[in-house]
């Protein structure tokens, strides 16, 4: 009788140990899932931050390029105007000479 009682007690302890192990495994799985979600969220935040930095840098470079091109265009426009003005003066002088002539 004592042996049967010990066997049942051991079975009950084994069942309790199994239930505790299942609960512990479920807890670990939940913590692991939370850690993965936090890691993914952090990675997403980092990705967005890097994109924002890249966009800001691209905008800065784009504005610098626009400024550079405007200055280059202004310089070429001025050179062309100077060239045309000198030719215009010479052409007007020839026309005036022809008309007087």
Image (tube, grey):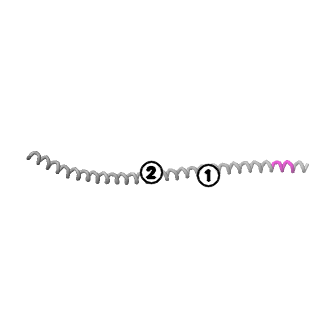
The kind of secondary structure element at disc 2 is helix
Q: Which residue lies furthest to the top in this view?
A: 99
Dot 1 surroundings within 10 Å: few (below 14), some, or many (20 or more)? few
The kind of secondary structure element at disc 1 is helix
Indicate which disc residue 55 carries.
2
Query: Whole-percent x and y of residue 38?
Result: 58, 51
Query: Whole-percent x and y of residue 23?
Result: 71, 49
- Given residues 95 and 56, the one toward you in this image is 95
Indicate which disc residue 97 carries.
none
The dominant secondary structure in magenta is helix
20 lies left or right of 85? right
- In the image, the segment drawn in magenta is 6-12
Rendered residue at 58%/50% (across/down): 40
Query: Whole-percent x and y of residue 82?
Result: 23, 53
- Given residues 78 and 45, the one toward you in this image is 78
Rendered residue at 29%/54% (across/down): 75
- Given residues 78 and 93, the one toward you in this image is 93
30 lies left or right of 15? left
2 lies left or right of 49? right
The Cα–Cα distance between marks 2 and 1, rounded to whole angstroms, is 30 Å
Dot 2 surroundings within 10 Å: few (below 14), some, or many (20 or more)? few
Rendered residue at 25%/51% (across/down): 80
Q: Earlier in the sequence, mark 2 or mark 1?
A: 1
Q: Name the residue under label 1.
A: 35
Quadrant of residue 57 within the rendered picture:
bottom left
């Amino acid at each position: 009788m004592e042996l049967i009682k010990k066997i049942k007690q051991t079975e009950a302890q084994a069942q309790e140990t199994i239930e505790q192990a299942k609960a512990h495994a479920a807890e670990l799985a939940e913590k692991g899932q939370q850690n993965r979600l936090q890691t993914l969220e952090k990675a997403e935040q980092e990705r967005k931050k890097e994109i924002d930095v890249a966009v800001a840098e691209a905008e800065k470079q784009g504005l610098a390029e626009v400024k550079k091109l405007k200055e280059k265009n202004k310089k070429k426009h001025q050179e062309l105007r100077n060239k045309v003005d000198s030719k215009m003066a010479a052409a007007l002088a020839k026309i005036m000479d022809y008309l007087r002539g």
